Amino acid sequence: MIRFYNGKTLRFDGGARLTDEEVWTDGGRIVYVGAPREDRPAFEREIDLGGDLLLPGFKNAHAHTAMTFLRSLADDMPLDRWLSEEVWPNEAKLDAEAVYDLTRLGDLEYLSSGITASFDMYIHNEAVAQANIDCGFRSVFCSALNDFDKDVENIEREYLRFNSLHPLIGYRLGIHGEYTTCLERLEYLAGLAEKYEAPCFTHLCETKAETEGCIGRYGLTPPQVLDRLGFFRYGGGGFHCIWMNGDDIELFARRGLYAVTCPASNLKLASGVAPVEKLRRAGVPLAIGTDGAGSNNALDMFREMYLVSALQKVTEGDAAACPADAVLEMACVGGARAMGLDDCTDIAPGMCADLVVLDLRRPNMQPENNIIKNVVYAGSKENVRLTMVDGVVRYERGEFFVGESAERIYEKARAFVRKIGA
């Protein structure tokens, strides 16, 4: 058992709120949240927070983790050229060993950013799963069915395998995007969703050209096409969700679909700004993702949170838009629910012990006029003191505990980049 005490605890039961409760974990679960007790059991470790903040880990609700090898390699290009000239040709050189090593590199960045789970869409999923298991990192995969897949039925095999493989691994149905997936394959995935009564996810309305192309093909926007096919009958959502009209937003609200915004990547690729405040006002559930390091180029939830809020304030012309507490809830709770991690949404007995300690005794966190606003508007990775996943400390004060040295993981990533001549 591990005890966290003498600090502040951020809870989300009915909205973000701060308490001075201590927290006990046992194995991978939280077993006590409350006032200090005299009848304490023997603990394996007692962590004196010294006034620091304990909160549920951030959830990266859209990622291509192994794209770390493309960081700063394919920059300053529009999305279509970025994909066709840099991403797809270089990804064709990946093998399972490289994806394993590159995923572990991404996991290190997540842990040092206070991220405890990722919603990952990539290739060589066996290697991705093993990398996350070996790092002790939680990940839910999203299939990326498209017209280039040679074995369409592998999606169903992966769905069954990865949803029963390991407690840290899950799987959701999805396509890469409407624009890369023919009607026959869209119908196939909708059939799988019906068979398993499962939610579906996809890149959605990421660019103006993508959305206009879909309207040209079907006379409907991407959300409307997919909904008519039964894609969203059992829920799900979209990644990016920039070029959505009022009918699309109403559809998302009615279906309870998750809109996952990725502001840094969308800005860098000049894709646009998602209408997050309009979605929020309509009652659409929201989450935040980093996208991949090839387009972001960081995997940093602090930067994403700040951008989510600040972009809505300027696009809405309203400084009150997208307040800090709502954004923090998107990062900690919304992402978990989008991934189906309903036991990772709060600090409460029975919840997973996926926890982060933020150092409040840094200049950017002082004075403590409003801690929640400090985290969203002033926070950075320098404040991440400790990250715990499934009850195990995986990062603390600059050190990683993932079964292999960080320098060894870095060198393997560098070796792969040298190998492909990137």
Image (tube, rainbow, N blue to C red):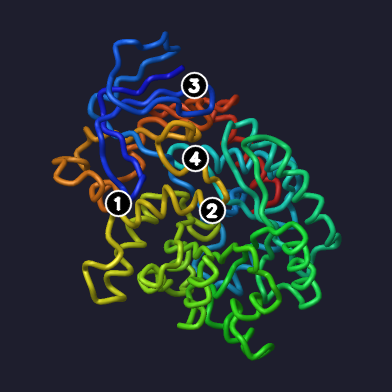
Residue designated by label 2: 71
> Label 4's element?
strand
* Quadrant in which the C terminus is drawn: bottom right
Residue at 30%, 34% (x, y): give it: 9
* Left or right for 195, reference 284: right
Mark 2 or 4, which is nearer the eye? Answer: 4
Indicate the amino acid at tag 4.
Thr
Indicate the amino acid at tag 1.
Val
Residue at 49%, 40% (x, y): give it: 116
> Label 3's element?
strand
Residue at 57%, 65% (x, y): give it: 237
* Left or right for 5, reference 288: left
Residue designated by label 1: 376
Q: Residues within 10 Å of mark 2 (few under 14, many from 20)?
A: some
- What is the C-alpha distance between the residues marked 2 and 4? 21 Å
Residue designated by label 3: 26
Indicate the amino acid at tag 2.
Arg
